[in-house]
Image (tube, helix red, strand yellow):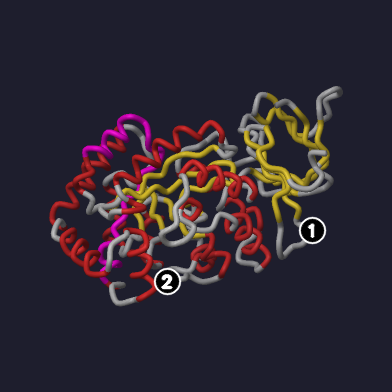
Amino acid sequence: MDMQIRNGRVLLPDGDVRRTDITVADGVIRELGGARNGQPSLDVRGRLVLPGIVDLHGDGFERHIMPRAGVSFERALGLLDTDRTMTANGITTAFHGLTVSWEPGLRSRDAAHAFLSDFAAVRGRLGCDTRLHLRFETYNLPALNEVQAWLRDGLVDMLAFNDHIDAMFSNLDRYAKMSGYLDRTGLNRDQFIARITEIRERAEAVPAGIERLAGAAVERNIPMASHDDPDPATRAWYHGLGCAISEFPLDEATARTARELGGKVVLGAPNALRGKSHINRLMARDAVRMGLCDVLTSDYFYPSLLQAAFALAREKVCPFPEAWGLVSAGPAKAVGLTDRGAIEPGRRADLVVVDDADPALPCAVLTMRQGAPVFSAGDLMG
């Protein structure tokens, strides 16, 4: 879609916010400033024009598929509904966090196969550039061959290594957590405990399985993350396997090690927005202040990305250009997407127009993917 976006307050790569026009042609930003007579134009009336949000880790789609315990809807419907939610909140690139676990139920092998099938069927209808972030539970050793085949066949855009065994054992007597596990798996408490006890006996074989999948990902240049790194030694081990992204490190020392090794640190936008961790781990705002955060992700709540960037600036945690970089340029760079994340000639015209008249509740009024509107609200589009 060729057009000119006029009268916007545009966030530029140098951090300046300047009134200028953006010329878009063939899905790419061609020019900043200047007028082209006869070209269709859109007057955004002084609103902010920002690079589209890139979300590296979102598993909120699970709640669109299973919105209530024991109540599931068609995955295709859930994925379409998720897409509407994401584009309405300025997300133009998203990595769905599909967990492939040893658990039965929502995160099982069968559920993963059904997801891949439905995702392939609806992908062309999605407004957001949606990709697959495969969250591999490291104790799921019987799935190694299959996951390696998915990597080989180009089905996976990002690979993360998850290990929730110890955390699950520590939560066996916590009603809220255990209820979540049982709802998700369809097991009763005794069955779940028996299952997780059996799975933990695989511990000695887990590192070799991780190394095998990491090697396959490196061969295909697939970005990798380790999830919930508990300490610097674990982060260093994963980094040595070519896994350069530390996703939700548990403490400052681990995050600092990730950065010292040249890796990227990913934290949750819900944490940054709320100003606290819901499980008492590393505070995102503290990490941002210390320069130990490269990326914010939606995690379980898609609206948090846009809102967190404005909240960080509003509460003087960091300047707004830096805050927006955590949800756009930062994640794009972390996974090698060099064609987006900034408003400058040659980049994709993935843009979000934000009405910030109410500083406490900014909202997206137009989201564009490669210059084509995928969400609009209000009267901008006539």
Whether residue 243 is visible: yes
Residues 98 and 107: in front is 107
**Is 149 situated above or below 193?**
above
Q: Nearer the viewer, residue 331 or 76?
A: 76
Position of residue 51 in the picture relative to residue 178 (left or right)? right
The image position of residue 371, as x and y in percent, is 68, 32
Q: Is residue 322 visible?
A: no
Q: CA distance from mark 2 to mark 1?
A: 33 Å
For the C terminus, the image quarter is top right
Q: Are marks 2 and 1 in contact (CB under 8 Å)?
A: no
| Residue 193 percent across, percent down from the top left | 22, 67
Where 377 sits versus 120, above or below? below
- Asked if the magenta segment contains residue 144, the reply would be no
Residue under the image location 58 percent in, 65 percent down: 273
When the figure is inspected, residue 186 is found, relative to residue 315, above or below; the finding is above
Residue flagged by tag 1: what amino acid is it?
Ala
* Mark 2 or mark 1, earlier in chain: 2
Q: Secondary structure at mark 1?
A: loop
Q: Position of residue 227 (x, y in %)?
A: 35, 56
Q: Residue at x 71, y 29 (%)?
A: 24
Q: Which residue is mark 2?
A: 279
Tell me the SS state at disc 2: loop
Count of marks, rendered view: 2
Q: Residue type at mark 2: give it.
A: Ile
Density class for disc 1 (Cα within 10 Å; few <14, some 14-19, many ≥20) is few
**Region rendered in magenta:** 145-169
Q: Is residue 155 magenta?
A: yes
Query: What residue is pinned by disc 1?
Result: 357
